Amino acid sequence: MVQPAHASGAASMSLSPASKSVGIGQSFSINISVAANSEAIDTVRAVLKFPADLLQMESFQLTGPFSR
């Protein structure tokens, strides 16, 4: 289930793709993007909720200004 993202100030967060159809045992990727919209940001927090009996997170990767 994808719910609208909430952000402080003018920053916004989005998921891509917004929906995805996959078969049993298939892997897929979701991109979480943050648009600062000219705000100075140094922290982003995202909470993803999903049914643990249907999905399993395998990995995540920070990119852009949040990668080290």
Image (spheres, grey):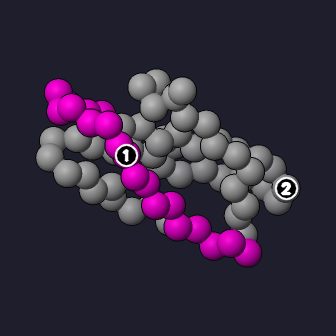
Which type of secondary structure does the marked residue at label 2 adopt?
loop
Marker disc for residue 25: 2
Q: Give the image location of residue 32, x and y in percent.
A: 47, 42
Mark yes or no: residue 65 visible. yes
* Residue located 33% across and 55% down the image: 5
**Does the magenta stretch mainly form a helix, a strand or a loop?**
loop
The 10 Å Cα crowd at callout 2, few under 14, some 14 to 19, many 20 or more, is few
* Residue located 27% across and 56% down the image: 6
> What's drawn in magenta, residue-wise?
35-53
Which type of secondary structure does the marked residue at label 1 adopt?
loop
Identify the amino acid type marked 1. Answer: Val
Identify the amino acid type marked 2. Answer: Gly
Q: Is 4 above or below relative to 44?
A: below
Q: Give the image location of residue 63, x and y in percent.
A: 52, 28
Marker disc for residue 44: 1
Residue 54 appears in which quarter of the rendering?
bottom right
Mark yes or no: residue 63 visible. no
